Amino acid sequence: MVGHLDPGVDAGPGVMSPLRVLELWRFPVKSLLGERLDRAELGVEGVTGDRGWALFDVATGFGLTARRVPELLFATGRSRADGTVEVVLPDGTATSDDAVLSDWAGRRVTLRPAAAVQGDRRYESPVDEAGDRWDPFSGADGAFHDNADARVTLLSTGTLGGWDRRRFRANVVLAGAGEDDLVGTRVAAGTGELDVVGRVPRCVMTTRPQAGGIGRDTGVFKTIHRERGGALAVGALVARPGVLAVGDVLRPA
């Protein structure tokens, strides 16, 4: 989850250490698993095609996330050449049919593109760790990001340590360390530029099990709060569109 970004009072510009793009990720359907890319187009809404679709609960109108429906992390969003998407279910079925998706989800759902959802986008977040109470919140316009200030998320291997990077669903995984020091700066990212806005607050979603052998781990969330003030990774806006590729090195713009 991306909440309101924390500018990080100790995250001054400093001297930028080399940070090289190790992995690039796009998540075509919000809260589902995503696609690993060799190169990504950066546009005003972030990585082109990222969070461009979402599943909505027909009865409540809420967009579904893995905070509320952890099973979403066992399906994968996959982009099609025509600009649409399909969902690959845990049994290997690839579909965009609402009836099939509803049977799998155990509730009536509909798969919608961002362009078809006008007005307020509403999701739910747990008030307590037990998940007994839930509060609605409004997401960003355009692509289905939780926060309009975090269209691209960046996370380094130095920050990850022994954690599996897939838990944190970053668009850009960087080899090196020190992405917090980028907050408040503009960086050249391939042929594009990013304004790094703030540190990314985390929620219970980081503890969820998901496909690929990642188990439930509540210690992740507790450690992030105890050692990092609740934030992990940084969020950025695209200042200049361009193309970012694996192997590119971030540089001061």
Image: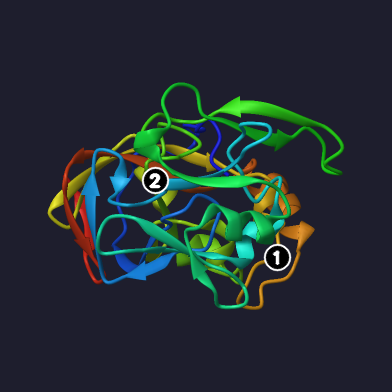
Of the residues under marks 1 and 2, which one precedes in the sequence? 2
Where does the image place residue 161, in percent across and percent down from the top left? Answer: 57, 68
Among the 4 quarters of the image, the one containing residue 99: bottom right
Q: Secondary structure at mark 1?
A: loop
Q: Amino acid at mark 2?
A: Asp
Q: Nearer the viewer, residue 204 or 122?
A: 122
Q: Amino acid at mark 1?
A: Pro
Disc assigned to residue 209: 1
Among the 4 quarters of the image, the one containing residue 132: top right
Disc assigned to residue 40: none
Would residue 172 be visible to someone looking at this image?
Answer: no
Where does the image place residue 31, in percent across and percent down from the top left? Answer: 55, 52
Which residue has dot 2 on it? 181
Mark 1–mark 2 Cα distance, whole angstroms, equals 30 Å
Q: Secondary structure at mark 2?
A: helix
Q: For the residues labelled 1 and 2, say whether their Cβ atoms are less than 8 Å apart.
A: no
In this view, the residue farthest toward the front is: 99
Where does the image place residue 214, in percent across and percent down from the top left? Answer: 66, 72
In this view, the residue farthest toward the left is: 191
Where does the image place residue 168, in percent across and percent down from the top left? Answer: 55, 57
Q: Nearer the viewer, residue 182 or 64?
A: 64
- Is disc 2 surrounded by few (<14), some (14 to 19) or many (20+) residues within 10 Å? many
**Residue 8 drawn above or below residue 66:** above
Tally of numbered discs: 2
- Is disc 1 surrounded by few (<14), some (14 to 19) or many (20+) residues within 10 Å? some
Residue depicted at 16% across the width and 44% down the height: 241
Q: Which mark lies nearer to you, 1 or 2?
A: 1
